Amino acid sequence: MQPTPPQPAGPTHAAAAPRRHPWIIGAALAAALAAALVLGRPHRGLAPEGEPARAGAAPAHVKPLTAQVREFEGSYAEAVAPTGVVREVALEAAPATLPLLDGRPLEVWAYNGQVPGPTIRVRRGDTLRVTFTNRLPQPTTVHWHGVRVPNAMDGVPGVTQPAVPPGGTFVYEFVPRDAGTFWFHPHLRSSEQVERGLYGVLIVEDPEPTPYSRDIAWVLDDWRIREGAIDPRFNTPHDLMHDGRWGNVITVNGSTDERLAVQPGERIRLRLLNAANGRVFAPDFSGLDARVIAVDGLYAARPLDPAGFELAPGNRIDLDITVPASTAGRQIGVIDRFTRRPNALASIDVSQGAAVQTPVFPSPATAHVPAWRDTDSIAPRSEYVLAARRGGELGIEWTLNGAAARHAHDIEAASGDGHAHEIAALPRGAFSKLRFVNDSGRLHPIHLHGMFFKVLSRDGRPADEPFFRDTVLVHPREAVDIGVVPLDEGRWMLHCHILEHAEAGMMSLLDVKAM
Ligand code: C2O
Ligand code: CU
């Protein structure tokens, strides 16, 4: 085992800003932002009271902004015709001892006795029926991260369902409407349950899958190992004050030495998921011909250079990789460059010999994504100030507009009706802008359930992201505007995907309804 030394004081992230790639934010803008970060200047101009509603801005009760909605149309389907095929999966969460990390036995919590859990593959339009059994010593739920499910299938305890008690079962059933890379994980005490190994990949295939030589998922995670075991101290003050729990061992698919054996010439679809509690990865694929074709499940408008992409907790990217003939016989290391000290993630081992014929087909990254360029004058429907304070059950609370959600730590609380959460209304089928103003020096990957959104701007400057997301990393002191057209009614969570921050209160609800 090659443990990675603990990251002193979290990774943050003087290092984060300069690393951003031009297609995420213009280089000049990045430099300006870096300067702002160095000066530590809070963006007061973006505080709620500093944002007068301008002429043309829509007050909350007025009808949908049809130009944005028109531009949105065709992005992803409101409904999909079910194929009638029902895919039945039995999923059980239970303690297990598995040869993980460097191969020595490790006590974990696992779905179906494996970490990562079983990769569930289903075709778009098929019905997925998962009969879940809880064999953990704690209540739990299963959340289908990124999937547009009916609200009752979203797995949020106390909001969409009561928690599943030890020994209990729950049947999750839905028809995935989007092809892409998704994942599932508990939504109760997740800073402990996900950290102990409960996560798995859900791959929704296109009706006619693209003929890649192979289709592989890499689940990135880190573990805090102490004396050969998962450190049982969760939600420590240190982790709460920083960017959550950053481990000292990094794994891909549970292994510190993941190797993908390929032949020169192969064309691979590689799906990356960051399942870590807090760590952000910036995977470097140099030496390979790699393009990002999908982000957080959905295809991008065009293939993108992966350099500098920040894969925050919850994020996925799908890569279209061609193994160049010139790499025959080489071992190509994939390196995480988010922190100042690079971390080896995995190796792509290219066999000797002549190249196989590279499959030729147009990259599937050709989705319709609205530009939503002229949205500056639209006032945010909701604005969230992200901050911390002392107090609460854990000693530190992470707040959204001064409110900390009380975490449901037991079945009683978890079977309540969601009163622990603030609720903001969002009109179904209309364009809304949401603003996140980070008034802290930490990272906050903000995740929305039940919808995809697009980043409109960072610190007031237009972002050039030709793709939707379900999770956006908000950097220290940064303000991020997103645009969204929610299609499904229900109460959907909005929360930080640094799981310790969520546990400490950084959770809220969006109530999507006809308005
Ligand atoms: Cu991946 Cu609300 O979570
Ligand atoms: Cu956070």
Image (cartoon, grey):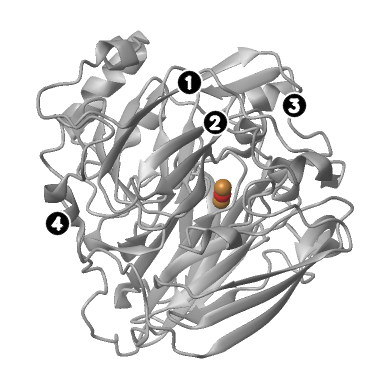
Q: Earlier in the sequence, mark 2 or mark 1?
A: 1
| Residue shown at 59% from the left, 52% from the top | 275
Q: Nearer the viewer, residue 210 or 305?
A: 210
Quarter of the image that includes the C terminus: top left
Report if the beta carbon of the residue with label 4 is closer than 8 angstroms to ligand 1.
no
Q: Which mark sits nearer the N-terminus, 3 or 1?
A: 3
Give neighbour class at mark 3: few <14, some 14-19, many 20+ (Cα, 10 Å): some
Residue 409 visible (yes or no): yes
Mark 2 and mark 1: Cα distance apart in space: 10 Å
Nearest the viewer among 117 and 457 is 457
Q: Which mark is residue 236?
A: 3
Mark 1 burial class by Cα count in 10 Å: few <14, some 14-19, many 20+: some
Q: CA distance from mark 3 to mark 2?
A: 25 Å
Up-down: is 25 above or below 276? above
- Residue type, label 4: Arg
Q: Is residue 86 left or right of residue 412?
A: left
Identify the residue under disc 4: 70
In contact (CB < 8 Å): disc 3 and disc 1: no
Residue wearing tag 2: 422
